[in-house]
Image (cartoon, helix red, strand yellow):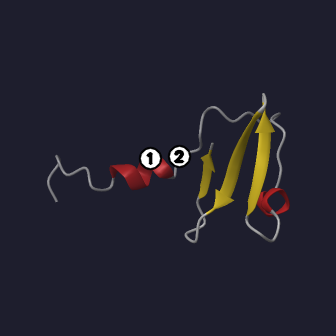
Amino acid sequence: MSHTDSSTAPLIASQEKPTHISPTDRRINSQQLLGEEGRVVIEHKGQQYLLRQTHAGKLILTK
């Protein structure tokens, strides 16, 4: 592997702890939030958003 090979960069970056999360932030377990259906509608400022879990276990928020 050469020094210019960045194929592991996304893997390393995805394992880093996000800096925007504070220890004092409110936390909710995703299973509680999404329920058995794996999805929840969130109402925000008169708009509806769908938060759902993919088959791969990722979370997606759509308007």
Q: Is 38 above or below relative to 61?
A: below
Query: SS class of the residue under badge 1?
Result: helix
61 on left or right of 23: left
Residue 16 - label: 2
Residue ID at (79%, 64%)? 31
The quarter in which the C terminus is drawn is top right
**Which amino acid does the dot numbered 1 rest on?**
Ala
Residue ID at (84%, 39%)? 26
What percent of the width, then of the height, locates residue 9?
34, 49
Tag 1–tag 2 contact (CB < 8 Å): yes
48 on left or right of 59: right
Residue ID at (19%, 52%)? 5
Q: Residue 57 occupies which quadrant of the picture?
A: bottom right
Q: Residue 21 occupies which quadrant of the picture?
A: top right
Q: Nearer the viewer, residue 20 or 44?
A: 44
Label 2, residues with CA under 10 Å away: few <14, some 14-19, many ≥20: few
Q: Nearer the viewer, residue 20 or 61?
A: 61
Q: Is 39 above or below relative to 9?
A: below
Label 1, residues with CA under 10 Å away: few <14, some 14-19, many ≥20: few
The outermost residue toward the top is 45
The residue labelled by disc 1 is 13
Query: SS class of the residue under badge 2?
Result: loop
Residue ID at (70%, 44%)? 49
Q: Nearer the viewer, residue 53 or 13?
A: 53
Q: Residue 34 occupies which quadrant of the picture?
A: bottom right
